[in-house]
Image (cartoon, rainbow, N blue to C red):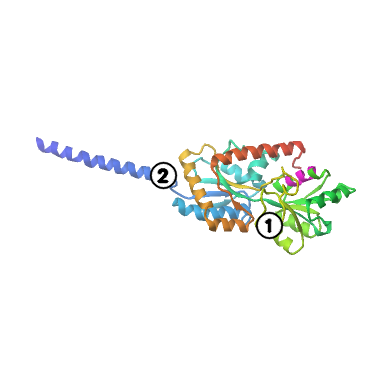
Amino acid sequence: MKKPTHRIVCRIPILALALTASAGTAWAQGAFPSHTIKIVVGSQAGSAPDVLARVLANEMGPLLGQSAIVDNKAGATGTIGAMAVASSPADGYTLLMGTVSNVALAPSFYPVKYDPVSSFTPIGMVASVPLVLVTTPSLQATSYAQLQATAKLMASPAQLSYSSPGVGGPQHLAGVLLQRQLGVALLHVPYKSGGAATTAVAAGEVQMAFAGIPAAAGLAQAKKVVPVLVTSRKRSSTMPDVATAVEAGLPDFEIDNWHALFAPANLPPATRATLEAALQKVLALQTVKDQFQKLGAEATPGTGTQLETFVASEARRWAQVVSDNKLKVE
């Protein structure tokens, strides 16, 4: 009679070990991340957000032990991509390379079905991308003071125009703010891309534009455009001789075409912490900083909480600009 009892007692530890091993395997399988992470970009391949996202994907994947890929969902000024992420499961596997355009500006211009703050979980700022105001050489305005004097001499507002990649972007709204500073009406001429808008200044089709620094630097070196000021707090390392807006006498003219990483709202805190830590490590790499600089971007590490506060402030700021100037997409 003791023999069966002995067998049962021996099997209990074995069964317990089997259950423990099974639970451990299940826990490991549920750990984040367990499969590919996707970074959604709201613009086409080769655009600044796309290139920045690919730099992140290449570095974050190995850090997290999984592959990371970029998924381009271009169109509607980036709102298609933003909406796709906002409506995705909050599991950390679908992220957004958000920009000032599709996160902070678009909700003030378009009937989007997402909110800049409540629809996303901020992971962290990625890059600061200031703009540079360039003028056509024939305008003979090499400083903001000269531009201001020239604007006052213009008999007709239509004589002074500026280009942008389209309605509702930071380049467009930078022109709106400049118009208020100059005290004259400027003619806005939208183009299909940032490159086309900058080239239009070099060709003399328009008198000025707020451009990306890398494209403008090449044209400035060739004497085809004249850089007047940069919209960042400090001077650009690419164009160190160009004054900042503050130095030019515009203390409240800081405009940043920023890029940041977001997940859908209600992301689990542990998953958010994992992604945030990986992002900070990537942005600290010198190789990443160097790649960003070629795009006129500066790596700007920060916490998700800091980004949340910043986005709320940016959304309020630009909504006020849109309202004050009665701007709309026609």
Which badge, 1 or 2, is on the more N-terminal residue?
2
Considering only vertical position in the picture, is 89 above or below 292? above
Q: Which mark is residue 240?
A: 1
Q: Residue at x 66, y 54 (%)?
A: 236
> Which quadrant of the rendered structure holds the C terminus?
top right
Q: Is residue 282 visible?
A: yes
Label 2 sits on residue: 31
Magenta-drawn stretch contains 179: yes
Q: Is residue 328 above or below residue 128?
A: above
Query: Horizontally, is 98 left or right of 159 in the view?
Result: left
Q: Quadrant of residue 12?
A: top left
Extreme-left residue of the structure: 1
Q: Quadrant of the N terminus?
A: top left
Residue in the image at 62% along x and 59% along y: 294
Q: Residues within 10 Å of mark 1 (few under 14, many from 20)?
A: few
Position of residue 141 measured from the top left corner of the image (x, y, whole percent): 81, 55
Judged by its main secondary structure, the magenta piece is helix
Left or right: 27, with 296 as reference point = left
Count of marks placed on residues? 2
Amino acid under disc 2: Ala
Q: Secondary structure at mark 1?
A: loop
Q: Which residues are magenta?
A: 173-180
Instruction: Provide the secondary structure element on which disc 2 rests.
Output: loop
Question: Is residue 153 inside the magenta stretch?
Answer: no
Which residue occupies 73% across, 39% down?
A: 321
